[in-house]
């Protein structure tokens, strides 16, 4: 079995990529994205964190979180979010992917990939690169031609706050992140 080394920094800021099982397009409608939002809010009540940036695409999501000063357990938070989303999404009549006998023994459901990808943000330059990467991701994947056209992104919040212009991303090329960003 593989051993995963996670980088835990109390009060740290992290970039995440979380992927659905077999890259199934789970987040294709407002209802599924709303269920994810409810799962995030539910987790935040028990285990606070700040969502700095986030985008939800059909089969994966990217997020940047900042954790409280004395906290570094983002794994617990993702576990709770994924569990709650899975429970409510299946209760709403959606279908999970078929699971192997081994995965059934582990009591895994066929909605999310087991693991997630994380990166500890090192400095402001690293934060800005990941911030832009998240918001440009729907264009990168060919889902829209303009960042402003993707509804499930914190881009719209950052336009209101004056960080971005509404047409940002139309005339820029966002460089790829080092590594594969979990994609």
Image (cartoon, rainbow, N blue to C red):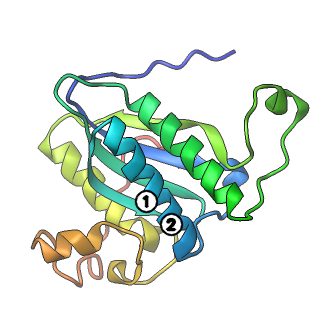
- Looking at this rendering, what residue extends furthest in the left direction? 162
Q: Is residue 120 above or below residue 167?
A: above
List x then y, in percent, for residue 52.
24, 52
Q: Are marks 1 and 2 in contact (CB under 8 Å)?
A: yes
Q: Nearer the viewer, residue 112 or 141?
A: 112
Q: In the visual, does 68 lie left or right of 112?
A: left
* Residue shown at 64% from the left, 49% from the top: 87
* Residue shown at 80% from the left, 31% from the top: 103
Which mark, residue 128? none
Q: In the visual, does 154 lie left or right of 92?
A: left
Q: Quadrant of residue 65?
A: top left
Q: Quadrant of residue 73?
A: top left
Which residue is the site of mark 2? Answer: 33
Whole-Å distance between the Cαs marked 1 and 2?
Answer: 6 Å
Q: Secondary structure at mark 2?
A: helix
List x then y, in percent, for residue 25.
66, 65
List x then y, in percent, for residue 148.
32, 81
């Amino acid at each position: 079995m593989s051993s995963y080394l996670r980088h835990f920094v109390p009060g740290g800021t992290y970039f995440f990529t979380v992927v659905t099982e077999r890259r199934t397009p789970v987040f294709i409608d407002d209802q599924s994205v709303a269920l994810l939002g409810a799962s995030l809010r539910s987790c935040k009540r028990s285990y606070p964190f700040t969502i700095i940036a986030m985008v939800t695409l059909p089969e994966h999501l990217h997020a940047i979180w900042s954790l409280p000063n004395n906290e570094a357990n983002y794994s617990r938070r993702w576990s709770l979010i994924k569990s709650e989303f899975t429970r409510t999404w299946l209760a709403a009549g959606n279908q999970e992917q078929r699971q192997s006998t081994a995965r059934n023994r582990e009591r895994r459901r066929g909605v999310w990939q087991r693991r997630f990808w994380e990166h500890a943000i090192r400095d402001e330059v690293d934060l800005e690169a990941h911030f832009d990467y998240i918001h440009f991701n729907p264009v990168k994947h060919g889902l829209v031609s303009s960042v402003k056209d993707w509804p499930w992104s914190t881009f719209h919040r950052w336009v209101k706050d004056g960080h971005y212009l509404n047409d940002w991303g139309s005339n820029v090329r966002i460089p790829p992140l080092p590594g594969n960003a979990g994609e």
